[in-house]
Image (cartoon, rainbow, N blue to C red):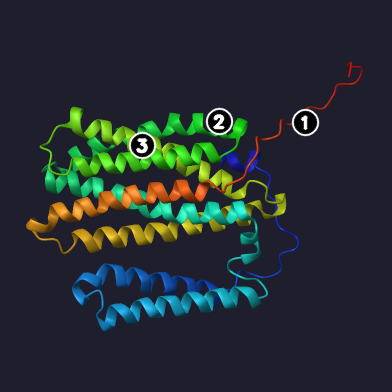
Amino acid sequence: VRGKSLLLESRDEAARELPDALGIVLLIASVALFALAIVQGAGWGLSGPRTLASLAGGALLFVCFVLRSRTAASPAVDLSLFSNPTYRLANMATFAFAIAFTAMFFNFVFFLTQRWAYTLFQAGLAITPGPLVVIPVAIVAGRIADLRGHRAVLVSGGLVFALGGALLYSAIESPPDFLRTWLPRALVTGTGVGLVLPSLSGAAVHGLPPGRLALGSAINQAVRQLGSVIGVGLVIALLGRADPSGEIAAFRSIAAILVAGGVLTSLLCLGVRTGPRAAPLVPMLPGAAP
């Protein structure tokens, strides 16, 4: 209600059509088939005909989506944005980190409830310190990015997140110990998330023309959600069919995904080029000395 009186509505006067519906359907179907292959791959067999058909179908639909986006009058995704190297790399990093971040979040719940026999309430409390540390870290990271650019924040954040994944890997068989085992690992991964996730959104749209900021941000968030779908699929594929004897290996595989996601994010962000944010122009008062 308050926003109606404070926020100014704006529209793109050049926009005449809604986003291409067929392109949206092609993208959704493509991701759905990839997720299906990941989730059902263990049961169908990694080289089984249904798994391969799902992967091939997903790839074919994605190619159709790209071709459609190049020719549609109002494409679902404006591919010309990806001609900007920083935008392209930031979105690739967003996709990779979203997979690892989502896998981490679901892994936390399953690990605490299955390995450490926590109740859902206890697991929720145990997970809380990680998200809490994200807030101050993100604020500090944003200020550093304003002063020095996003690359250093993103590269270091990816490595910190990877370290958190490695620490989780080492604790898979540890007995329940919140203070000495869980809390340090939750804080390290939370620090990595705070450094990476908000800064990736800022880096993605840095340098885009003002008229394309909303579109660029929307595509970046869509890429993040697509990565999240894959992350959920990986966790379900690894843990959903794991018997008690294979549970440890499944949790270790998920921890390895965290490490790989953090390292890949850092490598991709080495190419991110964003300079310090320019200081806002302050209008000079009449009669003031220059």
Q: Is residue 95 in sight in this rendering?
A: yes
Q: Could you tell me residue 278's position as x and y percent?
A: 71, 34
Q: Residue placed at 58% from the left, 68% from the top?
A: 76
Q: Earlier in the sequence, mark 3 or mark 1?
A: 3
Q: Earlier in the sequence, mark 2 or mark 3?
A: 2
Measured in 3D between alpha carbons, the distance from the residue under mark 2 to the one under mark 3, in whole angstroms, is: 18 Å
The numbered disc on residue 190 is 3
Circles 2 and 1: CB atoms closer than 8 Å: no
- Residue pointed to by mark 2: 144
Task: From the image, state whether disc 3 or disc 1 is nearer to you.
Answer: 3
Secondary structure state at the residue bearing disc 3: helix
* Amino acid found under the numbered disc labelled 1: Leu
Asked if 180 appears above or below 106 in the picture, the reply is above
Q: Quadrant of residue 276?
A: top right
Label 2: element kind = helix
Q: Is residue 43 left or right of residue 201?
A: left
Q: Nearer the viewer, mark 2 or mark 1?
A: 2
Q: CA distance from mark 2 to mark 1?
A: 20 Å
Q: Please name whichever residue, 222 or 21, is drawn nearer the observer in this view of the structure.
A: 222
Label 2 Cα crowd, 10 Å radius (few <14 / some 14-19 / many 20+): some
Three-letter amino acid code of the residue under disc 3: Gly
Residue at the image point whose x is 20% and y is 49% from the top: 110
Labelled disc at residue 281: 1
Judge the density around disc 1: few (<14), some (14-19), many (≥20) Cα neighbours within 10 Å: few
Residue 101 at x, y = what percent? 36, 49
Residue 106 in view of the camera: no
Question: Which of the two residues, 203 or 6, is positioned nearer the viewer here?
Answer: 203
